[in-house]
Amino acid sequence: MRISVFGCGYLGAVHAACMTRLGHEVVGIDVLPEQVAALERGEAPFFEPGLPDLLLEGKASGRLTFSTDPAAAAEATVHFLCVGTPQKRGENAADLTYVRAALEALLPLLKAGDVVVGKSTVPVGTAEELAERIREVQPDAELIWNPEFLREGFAVKDTLHPDRLVYGFAESPAAREAVAKLDEVYAVALGEGTPKIEADLATAQLVKVAANSFLATKISFINAMAELCEATGADVTLLADAIGHDARIGRKFLNAGVGFGGGCLPKDIRAFMARAGELGVDQALTFLREVDSINMRRRVRMVDLAREVSGGSIVGRQVAVLGAAFKPDSDDVRDSPALSVAAQMQLQGARVTVTDPKAIDNAAKKWPELNFADTVEDAVRDADVVLLLTEWPEYVALDPVELATHVRERRIIDGRNCLDPVAWRAAGWHYRALGRP
Ligand code: UDX
């Protein structure tokens, strides 16, 4: 199949590279010349395991190109919309500027029989608006809403072997032809038995935000339990293990700590609440306000705990922060709990040094007032307290005996409940965690 992908960020770049791996001929379109130039050289503009190899493979095959010129998409028959829908400045709602602009760039190129496939996370009702616009310009093209569920860090695997494929469309003979074309695009995954759910447009759009709301709720649920554990001396990790054995609950996404961040969960639940308000059903999602508040309270608690551990004040204290990315295996610092805590502590008078295996460049661009170190040793040198805020495997594997030789005071707060308290205490550390005695 000849495919175009509009938007070459985290979602689109991975999607384009993966579609080439599946044997298709792909052109990726993006408005950022630097992004396109890097991808054209076969370089990933962000850290994502497996992506560099796929890009090089795609370039070598001659079936993967990138361009800033939408006209390069003219030969494609299936066009994926993969642009971002960030949170509007000062508002909860999603900003649809890029989705609408991408569609407008694509419209003049659309031929009869073409399929536009929406993958961006949008407020329910957006797809209907885009479908109407397509009908006005090219009535013989179809729109299918096909939300993307990839996780950063596992984006290549999630794209090549998705949990499920959701197709949203308005039933018609032409839509059936479009579905057949999309089936051809996903022939490998469908051949592996990936479940396919056909739905109306509204349901397909809702699936994505409902899934992310559920995940965010699960994390905030266990973080609320962590607050109870802190008040009672209970251990939230044991609690999560014990309730997680109930198959109806499940242990996944019950890791208590400094909470969720990233480019998706926080802004998606806020945009969902905003949309529910517009639809007159805001009460249905009032609980998400609480999910958001519980999540933000964890960051405050982390700063309070650091103050407590430091003897009542963090002013002038040397604080080492391990982790800047919103989660391991990513260089993404969007709404990163780690950086939010680091910045708060700096603002309150601490001297903060942050390290991260991959995200320092992105973090320094966003938070130039923080100090950054390339290595853990440099970050923790003479530290009064160490905060572990992103559970990179190399941090989980740190040797407490060795690390103790670099710090001024052996105090560590495990913001992700990923260290062994026994081993750290045995090495003379004052170990504290969120939701653990
Ligand atoms: C999420 C969804 O998982 C994905 O399906 C969707 O397509 C995009 O949004 P992502 O943002 O890449 O993916 O990260 P995810 O792995 O979901 O983690 C989100 C945040 O939750 C991270 O900050 C992570 O540290 C935090 N988290 C996750 C917890 O605090 N506890 C957990 O148990 C799990």
Image (cartoon, helix red, strand yellow):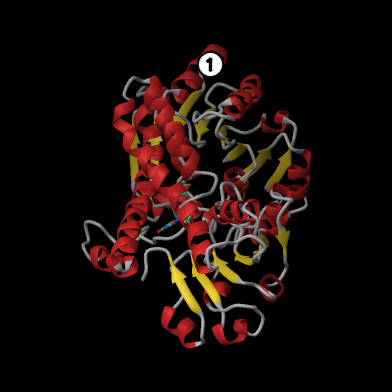
Q: Position of residue 410 (x, y in %)?
A: 56, 79
Task: Looking at the picture, tell me which residue is in the foreground, 37 or 326.
Answer: 326
Task: Looking at the picture, tell me which residue is in the foreground, 358 or 344.
Answer: 344
Above or below, 316 against 39 in this view is: below
Q: Residue at x 53, y 72 (%)?
A: 412
Whether residue 418 can be seen here: no
Whether residue 240 can be seen here: yes
To which quarter of the image does residue 361 belong?
bottom right
Q: Is residue 22 left or right of residue 71?
A: left
Q: Position of residue 191 (x, y in %)?
A: 40, 53
Q: Position of residue 362 (x, y in %)?
A: 69, 52
Q: Residue at x 59, y 49 (%)?
A: 14
Task: Looking at the picture, tell me which residue is in the foreground, 2 or 232.
Answer: 232
The residue positioned farthest toward the top in the image shown:
136
Q: How many marks?
A: 1
Q: Position of residue 318 (x, y in %)?
A: 66, 67
The quadrant of the picture occupied by the C terminus is bottom left
Label 1, on which residue?
133
Q: Given the image, on which type of amino acid does mark 1 rest?
A: Arg
